[in-house]
Image (cartoon, helix red, strand yellow):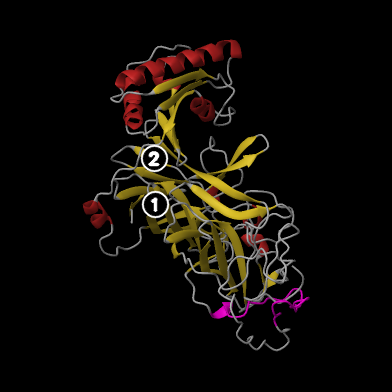
Amino acid sequence: MTTGVPSTRRILALGVPLVLAATGCGVLPSRDAGPRPPAETPAAGTPAPSTPGASTPAMSTPGTTATPSGQGTRPALAETRSTMTPDLKVEVIGLHRVKSRHLIIQVRLSNTGTDKNLSWAGEMGDHTRPLGEIKWASGIGVLDARAHTWILPYKPAGGPCLCSDQDRDHLGPFIEPGESITVYAVTPAPSGHPATATVATPVGPPMPDVPISDGPPAGDFPDPGAAPVTPVTRRVVLPSESLDKSEETADDGTDLQVNLSSDVLFAVNRATLTPRAKAVIARTAKLVDASPGAVVKVEGHADSSGDDAVNDPLSLRRARAVQRALSGLLTRGGIRFQAKGYGSRRPLYGNDTAEGRRRNRRVTVTFARPRPKAADPAGDVVSTLGPAPDPTAGGTAAGRPFSLRITGLRRLDGVLGLLTYTVTNQGPAEAWFNELHHAQDWESYKYQAASNVRLTDAAARRRYLPGRLQVPADDGVDSSCACTDVSGVRVGTEKFAPGQTREFWGLFALPETAGTLDVRIASFGDLQVPVR
């Protein structure tokens, strides 16, 4: 786009491949497609908005902030606050599904402080990929809970995202105290034509249950069907593990991967199942019975000790031993097994720690994820009865007093759940609470995050870990935590002023039947938290 004050009636163009003509070619349907009402009177010192067909739209002064006409007074559909910068308020003011395939997300960013400008582009950028310059609202997206997918703005051929651009849209790098700007993103629509969506931004907790309108949005936006674009998505993988360390699972919404500990299944350098192995494999057999899939992959893996001459044949023999045991426990027919041994070539974790090596010694069973069980109406009533006080706990970090409050543990769709909580510095001096990113050493994420959180179903003796966002990389797949980021521009998130409170979040798998889970965050004690 050329220069101009952002207006609900101006045509937005996203780089060379999506240059839009003044006639509206390549523009998504707009509520403003009919006769235009008179433009609002601009504030003093602000150029008048452009009109359709004008060769050069009017501009705001570079470095100033501006809210498109009418956007500043639109009611918010949902809102949150930045964990890093509490004065930055984030409001969803538009969520429109167009052509049944795309979403237009409009977000109002407001500086509610009184004494300093706020930089917005660094806060709103997608931290899961390097973009070079920090000037795009590329981190705005939606969570498709049913498909376990985090959906980000389309990527056009000539730019990083179909979203607001600080330079092109002349929004300025800062939001002044008391001022607002409106930014947008164009993304694929979530699957299943839902009535609501969970809107996600990089700055604070995702915002569930935002209503989706199928009417045209207020404004003109680029049509992703007018030129080649690439969807940008992150698969959300939900891990859990048994408390006895016999197995761990990873659910990506399509397949369920069960990693059985070789230390439990076999003696050292042996491929004969131990007496304990049958009970461990029996749980996996029940999951396979509940799966709709006909193919089950069984793969043996080793750690990096030893050599390929030993590890390769041993891992294959172990895979075949588990296949035979599984086959004898299944109650349904028509299943085809594929058994392979990979030796030490496919580690899940680093081999530089004892725990990482232990978890790499495994037999992995992969199959289509079981269908979710039907909801128990009685159980739902019990889990949502009446307001209850938020669970709280106290603790210290480096001798400084901190408190924890769980503000929500809610089911988004199926097994996917959202945990939100606040941490407060109760002391009289500035202090760091660095424990949030001190997760177990075998866990590996692309960026530092508030991943030191565990949910436990005591009755089922099962623990749930933060979800992982799978990001394609040149050498495979990187994992980022599906939780509050505390790296990059948010590196100071764990630093608290006296009395300051920050809100954090994380995505987890939630057991289908549990109404209450034990939640442990950093060094705070376990809290019993109801699932809403």
Does residue 61 show up magenta in the picture?
yes
Q: Residue at x 46, y 64 (%)?
A: 212
Q: Is residue 178 left or right of residue 528?
A: right
Query: Counting residues from the N terminus, which is met first, the one under dot 2 or under dot 1?
Result: 1
Do callouts 2 and 1 mark residues in contact (Cβ within 8 Å)?
no
Residue type pointed to by label 1: Asp
Identified at 43% across, 49% down, the residue is 146
Q: Is residue 237 above or below residue 290?
A: below
- Spatial CA distance of label 2 from label 1 is 19 Å
Is the C terminus in the top left, top right, bottom left or bottom right quadrant? bottom left
Q: Please name whichever residue, 343 or 160, is drawn nearer the observer in this view of the structure.
A: 160
Position of residue 230 measured from the top left corner of the image (x, y, whole percent): 64, 49
User: Which of 431 and 36 lies nearest the eye of the viewer?
Assistant: 36
Q: Which mark is residue 463?
A: 2
Q: Residues within 10 Å of mark 2 (few under 14, many from 20)?
A: many
Q: Position of residue 508 (x, y in %)?
A: 43, 47
Q: Position of residue 145 (x, y in %)?
A: 45, 51
- From this viewpoint, which residue is outermost toward the left? 378
As for residue 118 lying within the magenta part, the answer is no
Range drawn in magenta:
49-73
Percent from the top left, x then y, of residue 214? Answer: 48, 66
Amino acid of disc 2: Arg
